[in-house]
Amino acid sequence: MGKQKPKMGAEYYVPEIIDGKPDVFETEWSNDDLDHKRYEAGVVFTDKYDAIIVAKKMLDMVKEIADEKREL
């Protein structure tokens, strides 16, 4: 993956979509299974701005898939 994992206790951000809008969830690295699953999924960001960009991309993808389904 190349990205370094946050240090114990460091804040990190996870992109998410809330009420149809891009958002981020802020949490603390505790080196538990959930932290590692998020890291392996590529959704651990130490920079809030980077997480927001990914949340926007996620929302765009969801909208694109919904549009494609409507066309079927």
Image (tube, grey):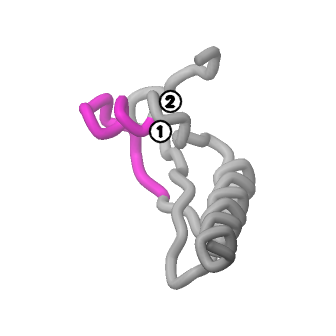
Q: Amino acid at mark 2?
A: Pro
Question: Going by the picture, which residue comes out furthest to the bottom?
Answer: 19
Secondary structure of the residue carrying numbered label 1: loop
Classify mark 2: residues with Cα within 10 Å, few (<14), some (14-19) or many (20+): some
Name which residue lies at 56% across and 56% down. Answer: 15
Residue 26 at x, y = what percent? 48, 57
Secondary structure of the residue carrying numbered label 2: loop
Quarter assignment of residue 32: top left
Q: Which residues are magenta?
A: 26-38
Q: Is residue 9 above or below residue 19?
A: above
Q: Amino acid at mark 1?
A: Ala
| Residues at marks 1 and 2, CA–CA distance in whole angstroms | 6 Å
Residue 22 visible? The answer is: no
Taking the image as shown, residue 49 lies to the left or right of residue 41, namely right
Q: Is residue 69 above or below residue 5?
A: below
Name which residue lies at 42% across and 52% down. Answer: 27
Name which residue lies at 48% across and 61% down. Answer: 25
Residues at discs 1 and 2 in contact (Cβ within 8 Å): yes
Is residue 58 found inside the magenta-colored segment of the image? Answer: no
Q: Which residue is mark 1?
A: 10
Q: Which residue is mark 2?
A: 6
Residue 1 at x, y = what percent? 59, 18
Residue 53 at x, y = what percent? 74, 56
Of 26 and 40, nearer the camera is 40
Is residue 28 found inside the magenta-colored segment of the image? Answer: yes
